[in-house]
Amino acid sequence: MARSTGGPFAFLRATRPGAARAAARAGYLDPCLPLFARPLKRVAETGFARVSGQYRGQMFDVQVVPDSLNLRKLPCLWLLVTLVERLPVAGTFDVMLRATGAETFSNFGNLPDQIAVPVGFPEGCTIRTDAEGAVPSAAVIGRYMSELDAARLKEVVVAEAGVRVVWLAEEADRGRYLLFRDAEMGGIALQPAVLRPLMDGLCGLWADVMAEAGPREWVTG
């Protein structure tokens, strides 16, 4: 009689990859935890970690969002880095690069007004706001964006609640995805060398917006 290949050993073989995947997602931000003072880590519904804590004296929130909805592009992993400190601004100013309409991580599509893209901004930008006529100067946002890799930069948001950058952390392996529809990402943890410059840049952007806005208003000219 042939030996059965079922039973508990088959179950362990089947569950091991799932367990390893879950551990990798939950630990995706672990190398970055030392950057924060008193970090708070939790696991989102996607299985990826979400971390909040103080960096350079300001509160940050870092999320990891997998995206496989755009059928014409490779699945990707977005890094949402938010400096959660209030600003005296009149509304939301949102710059989206390569907008597809499938950015489920963003409120971009719900903003009512689309405005002209200033000279010098990266190609493929679309700008929307809910406070047309009361937006930050192009110099402030443009200076910040010019310091980032436009190929990985996806979104910059300035709002009363703070400032955010959305960054392409990873794309699915093209070969595995095309052949096997394998969209697994997040197997290699995010390194501080990636996250730190994004947070440093947001600290500078927040300070510049605060300086330009004054006590309670935007520069509107």
Image (cartoon, rainbow, N blue to C red):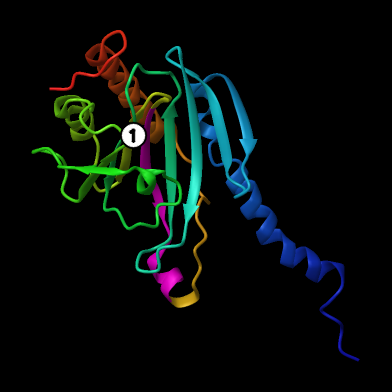
Q: Secondary structure at mark 1?
A: strand
On screen, residue 97 versus residue 104, left or right, reads: left
Give 91 or 52, whichever is nearer the viewer.
91
Examine the image and state in which quarter residue 178 appears: bottom left
- For the question of whether residue 189 can be seen, the reply is no
Give 158 or 201, whichever is nearer the viewer.
158
Looking at this rendering, what residue extends furthest in the top direction? 215
**Residue depicted at 42% across the width and 45% down the height:** 106
Above or below, comparing residue 126 to residue 159 in the picture: below
Examine the image and state in which quarter residue 160 appears: top left
**Residue depicted at 43% across the width and 47% down the height:** 78
Residue 131, horizontal then vertical, whole percent? 29, 31
The segment highlighted magenta reads 163-178
- For the question of whether residue 93 can be seen, the reply is yes
Give 131 or 123, whichever is nearer the viewer.
131
Examine the image and state in which quarter residue 85 appears: top left
Say what amino acid the circle numbered 1 marks: Val
